[in-house]
Amino acid sequence: MSDLRLTLVQSDLRWEDPQENCHNLALQLADLDHHSTDLIILPEMFATGFTMNSREMAQPYAQSEVVAWMLEQARTRQVVMVGSVAVVEQGQYFNRMVWAQPDGQLQHYDKRHLFRMAGEHERYAMGTERVILNWKGFRIQLCVCYDLRFPVWLRQQSSPQQPFEYDLLLCVANWPDPRRHAWRTLLQARASENLCYVAGVNRVGDDAKGNHYTGDSLLVDFRGELICDRPINQAFIATETLNLEALKAFREAFPAWQDADDFQIL
């Protein structure tokens, strides 16, 4: 397949209320026609907001009601559902980006770069592995919020046999209003430098700490140009179609990857 339909879900989140957030997201998704998309992307910590109360709010991963809700949505809609959730596993707490498939399979990526300015590094464990998954012919790399500021972690690791590891970068976030310029700029930069599509899904509204979120969820093409850019401060659902052949054609016409520096992530 050469097309991937993905849906960005920008939402206001109720602070530390997983049941209410899942209910509200289900209502928001109710208008989305079944079989109209392949991949639904929710914000970072969509069930709780960006909470540092990991000991109180994180659910055991294997028994998580939020993860079970994602799996049910994926099964019912026959799509992949992705978003990040606070979980605990083997005594460690993670800001975990969960990938729930319609066949019931789960994959995940644990946030690598923890936002120390909020003390996240003191409340959650750091992820250690990059995660690239395949869906509908697209290779998709996962990342969470603050990861976006670290281009080496997200850089395509080229080789003569495989110049591109991934075709689409997914970033879910709780990225507040004072730094919205950086959010928008970095999403476009990651697309340009990696010759890939980039989808960034953020929240709107206010959290219990007084942070305001304007959203600015974006879909960016391999040139760094905007495919989807909606007005700020509004919840919305937007579905767009990405074309793999267009991406491959651009990579062949503009083979900047051939001049890239060799490196290795340690």
Image (cartoon, rainbow, N blue to C red):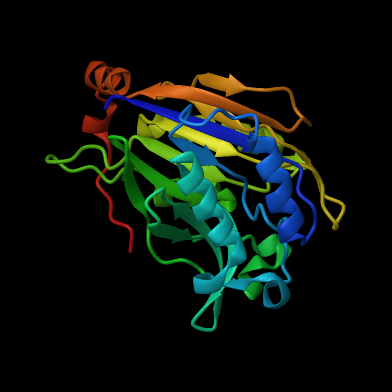
Q: Is residue 117 left or right of residue 110?
A: right
Q: Is residue 138 above or below residue 63?
A: above
Q: Residue furthest front?
A: 76
Residue nearest the viewer, comparing 259 with 150: 150
Instruction: State the image coordinates of residue 172 (x, y, percent, origin top left).
Output: 57, 46
**Residue sitting at x 57%, y 68%:** 64
**Residue sitting at x 28%, y 51%:** 263
Residue nearest the viewer, comparing 258 with 219: 219
Instruction: State the image coordinates of residue 198 (x, y, percent, origin top left).
Output: 47, 33
Residue 139 location, quadrant = top left
Question: Which quadrant holds the C terminus?
Answer: bottom left
Instruction: State the image coordinates of residue 2 (x, y, percent, origin top left).
Output: 28, 24
**Residue sitting at x 46%, y 48%:** 75
Q: Is residue 228 above or below residue 135?
A: above
Q: Is residue 119 left or right of residue 91?
A: right
Instruction: State the image coordinates of residue 243 (x, y, percent, origin top left).
Output: 35, 21
